[in-house]
Amino acid sequence: MLGNFGYHNPTKLYFGEDSLGYLKDELKNYGENVLLVYGGGSIKKSGLYDDIAAILKDCKKNVAEVPGVMPNPTVEKLNEGIEIARKNRSEFILAVGGGSVCDYSKALSVSIHCNDDPWQKYYIRFEEPECEIVPVGCVLTMAGTGSEMNGGAVITNHESKLKIGHVFGDDVMPKFSILNPLYTMTLPKYQMIAGIYDIFNHICEQYFSGEDDNTSDYISEGLMKSLIHSSGIAVSDPQNYEARSNIMWTATWALNTLIAQGKSTDWMVHMLGQAVGAYTDATHGMTLAAVSLPYYRHIMPYGLKKFARFATEVWGISKDGKSDKQLADEGLLAMEKWMKEIGLVMNITDLGVTNGMIEGIADATLILDGGYKVLDREEIIGILRSSMK
């Protein structure tokens, strides 16, 4: 375990079938003017909207709404929410939905009282908020992003063809999150599978960095093994509560900053996937799946020992006198087999990418330096072309 770090996560979690019962107690801690943020209306079909509306009424809250938050929330939608929140003097944001709704609500929390252009300030200049931050609480309906227990907020600008995430500090993290696995069971299977891979890749982005003996890596291996096991059950039986609850809990721990402690981290799969998403508006988890294997095969020679460990510790491949290169290759083949078995999209062509988009996507890809290899533009283009097959 290398380096020095401090660790604190301020988000309070309520987990399980009865977790919504805690919302009333939490709402007592915040102002009367609540902004209710949600997506495309599935919470109304499921009855969750009515349950939450009743709690808000019982708590005597004045409620304004921002409905229709899309899977890849846009700058235009952010500006719409700012206007509604300011008009209604919102003092608390209640996000009800998946990761995009939670992300959007955090972006909104730092933008309502911001005197600058939030896109320029937070997503181009990557500055931190200096204004009052409106607190956020989440009721989660989809497992995947981990947004319920971190400070991340991804926003898309279609005009600039950019999809960018800003990871804010403790003050922006949700004050509380309610996680009921039953709420995830109304999701279409495609969205569930995309969420499963988003979770897996969050772990990989932190795992594939560094060579020291790091406790965080042992935790990561356990989380990956749990997810692989539960994903097979959930794909064949989407109503299996135990599998869905394990997936939901793994999603939270995959990206609540715990397994990043004492490590450098990579995040280039996310940079590639988000650039693809900016051009196609494709489902986030599927963009990650489509670029992952070409990326990992490209960087594998630079982090061979970790990829060999991945094969033995996560996929159970026997060393049996094999070289690190043989083990690493077998590990990625095992990962590919699992990805196909659960039904992930395996190339960016199926997501709508054409040859004419490749250079633009490469230019929209932020290059980070935490992984085993710092990419140049030509390498990014090569990985994207390999991802089309």
Image (cartoon, grey):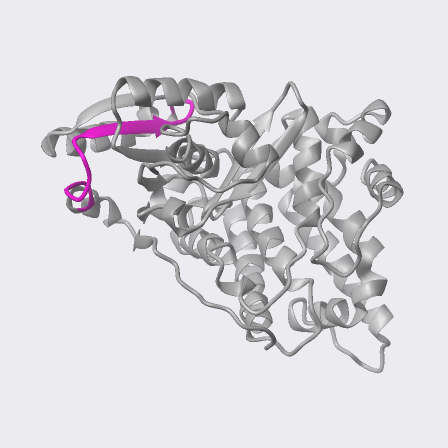
Towards the viewer: 58 or 125: 125
Q: Is residue 302 visible?
A: yes
* Residue 71 visible in rendering: no
Over which residues does the magenta segment extend? 26-41
Residue at image point 39% right, 22% down:
81
Q: Position of residue 327 (x, y in %)?
A: 80, 70
Residue 385 image position (x, y, % from top left): 86, 37
Asked if residue 58 lies left or right of residue 18, the reply is left
Q: Is residue 2 left or right of residue 53?
A: right
All told, the count of numbered labels is 0
Q: Is residue 325 left or right of residue 41?
A: right
Up-down: is 134 above or below 243? above
Identify the residue at horizontal 45%, vertical 20% (top origin). 79
Instruction: For the N terminus, give its image quadrant.
Output: bottom right
Q: Quadrant of the C terminus?
A: top right
Compared with 13, 355 (above or below) is above
Residue 252: horizontal and vertical position, in percent? 45, 54
Residue 252 forms part of the magenta stretch? no
Closer to the camera, 213 or 20? 213
